[in-house]
Image (tube, grey):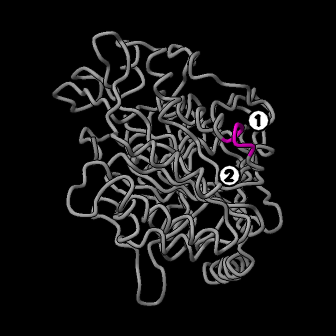
């Protein structure tokens, strides 16, 4: 078979899958390939010309079990991901994350000759709103995997292995849009993390999370950057929008600024725009800072912003998830010293090129973000939101008064690390 003929076959395959918005890849060492699948070898490096391939300079290494990335160029939307992990000759231990470290599946273990099928829905987007309009993303976001034209998957773990991958466009499932700041955003680098990138792991393939949060944002700057406008172009009846602000809003000063003034007006914009499209707004009070008093109790540092959100939820008759209250219980249950294990507190030398201590009392590490995602889930259940039915069946009840043991939490670091803290404090 000559090269010209091979290229023509590929062009026919790629055109077909692009039009159908279904993409099928075979990663096995089998000589035969199932109909409709594209064979993947280490030579398949991502490029704009092919629109798929191993990405970011990482290839699978079954011998050493290193993480690797695979990207596919797809239009904006929600995609059903079916990933078959496991191989005939290799024991498998795989964690799957999407885009900017969104946790999809963790610690999937198969023995030699076994496979396991992981299915979920993942959202992909770029900054374009219309022909001549774009989200005003920040300079640092331009390199983030959340804001480009491709859907990127990270395969990590002790021995990450994938045999088969299918991506299929789906339009009928409810999307939960997340709006917020650095405590919600998909943090790109270790050791930072937020609850918004952990929560997809707990839900089945009948809902999808689309995290539009960004570090440093307040309700008004989120709107001004056209993040909400982009969301509204994707929103459909039956979707949800979770709104967690107040953390940075409380720092704003000036005439007309305040929890019951400008903040209320901005939150009402989110609520009204969502409801006018048949979507369901949910208010989420801001997470507490790690700010203990001399008695080991958390000090309130958010002024009257959490109370304003509680008041507005009652007035508008919409659900509220009270993270402000739950994270107080969580941090006090962990205690003054052990609560550091939920935040970015690391001595110098904990990470490559880390020359000084990290001691951040606002931003979470993966363990802390995971605990707070569980708090959000309890809030979803308490509010009796219909998406509760789509929690994965094995998800157990969680109490912030009894957090998970830090020593049992397993997290495999992504290869990207940054010692610069996110915006906001």
Q: Is residue 1 shown to the viewer in this render?
A: no
Q: Is residue 192 covered in magenta?
A: no
Residue 7: image location, x then y, percent: 62, 80
Report, in whole angstroms, how far the alpha carbon at label 2 lies from the one at label 1.
Answer: 12 Å
Secondary structure under the numbered disc 1 in the rendered image: loop
Q: Residue furthest top?
A: 295
- Pointers 2 and 1 in contact (CB under 8 A)? no
Q: Taking 321 as reference, is 285 left or right?
A: left
Along the viewing direction, whichever of 359 and 58 lies nearer the viewer: 359
Q: Is residue 421 left or right of residue 74?
A: left
The magenta stretch is 380-384
> Can you say which quadrant of the picture contains the N terminus?
bottom right
Q: Residues within 10 Å of mark 1 (few under 14, many from 20)?
A: some
Height in image: 329 above or below 241? above
Residue 360 in picture, x, y percent from top left: 28, 30
What residue sits 44% from the left and 53% below the top?
180
Q: Where is residue 198, by image quadrant? A: top right
Q: Is residue 332 left or right of residue 109?
A: left
Q: Earlier in the sequence, mark 2 or mark 1?
A: 2
Magenta highlight: main SS: helix
Instruction: Please tell me whether residue 207 is drawn above or below residue 382 in the rendered image.
Output: below
Q: Which residue is mark 2?
A: 27
Q: Quadrant of residue 418?
A: top left
Q: Around disc 2, counting alpha carbons within 10 Å, would you say few (fewer than 14), some (14 to 19), or many (20 or more)?
A: many
Residue 220 in percent (x, y) is at 36, 64
Residue, x 36% and y 70% (percent of image)? 225
**Quarter of the image that includes the C terminus:** top left
Residue where numbered disc 1 is placed? 88
- Residue 219 appearing in the image: yes
Q: Which residue is pictured at 79% across the width and 69% down the height?
A: 36
């Amino acid at each position: 078979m000559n090269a010209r003929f091979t290229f023509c076959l590929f062009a026919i395959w790629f055109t077909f899958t692009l039009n159908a918005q279904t993409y099928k890849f075979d990663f096995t060492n089998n000589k035969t390939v199932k109909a409709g699948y594209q064979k993947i070898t280490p030579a398949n490096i991502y490029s704009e010309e092919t629109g798929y391939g191993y990405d970011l300079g990482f290839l699978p290494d079954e011998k050493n079990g290193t993480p690797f990335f695979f990207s596919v160029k797809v239009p904006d939307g929600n995609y059903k991901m079916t990933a078959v992990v496991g191989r005939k000759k290799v024991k498998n231990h795989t964690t799957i994350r999407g885009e900017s470290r969104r946790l999809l599946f963790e610690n999937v273990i198969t023995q030699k000759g076994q496979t396991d099928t992981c299915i979920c829905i993942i959202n992909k987007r770029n900054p374009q709103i219309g022909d001549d309009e774009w989200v005003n993303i920040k300079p640092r976001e331009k390199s983030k995997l959340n804001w480009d034209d491709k859907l990127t998957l990270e395969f990590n773990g002790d021995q990450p292995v994938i045999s088969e991958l299918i991506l299929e466009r789906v339009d009928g499932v409810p999307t939960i849009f997340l709006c917020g700041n650095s405590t919600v955003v998909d943090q790109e680098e270790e050791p930072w993390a937020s609850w918004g990138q952990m929560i997809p792991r707990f839900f089945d393939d009948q809902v999808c999370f689309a995290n539009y949060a960004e570090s440093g944002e307040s309700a008004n700057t989120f709107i001004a950057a056209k993040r909400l406008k982009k969301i509204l172009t994707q929103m459909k009846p039956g979707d949800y929008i979770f709104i967690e602000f107040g953390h940075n809003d409380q720092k704003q000063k000036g005439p007309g600024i305040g929890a019951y003034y400008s903040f209320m007006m901005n939150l009402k914009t989110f609520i009204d725009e969502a409801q006018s499209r048949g979507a369901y707004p949910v208010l989420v009070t801001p997470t507490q800072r790690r700010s203990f008093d001399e008695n080991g109790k958390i000090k309130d540092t958010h002024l009257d912003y959490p109370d304003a959100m509680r008041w507005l939820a009652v007035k508008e008759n919409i659900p509220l998830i009270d993270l402000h209250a739950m994270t107080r219980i969580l941090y006090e249950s962990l205690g003054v010293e052990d609560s550091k294990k939920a935040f970015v507190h690391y001595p110098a030398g904990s990470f490559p090129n880390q020359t000084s201590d990290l001691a951040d009392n606002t931003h979470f590490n993966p363990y802390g973000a995971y605990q707070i995602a569980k708090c959000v889930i309890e809030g979803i259940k308490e509010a009796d939101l219909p998406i509760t039915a789509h929690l994965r069946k094995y998800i157990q009840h969680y109490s912030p008064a009894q957090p998970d043991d830090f020593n049992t939490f397993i997290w495999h670091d992504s290869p990207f690390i940054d010692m610069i803290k996110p915006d906001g404090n």
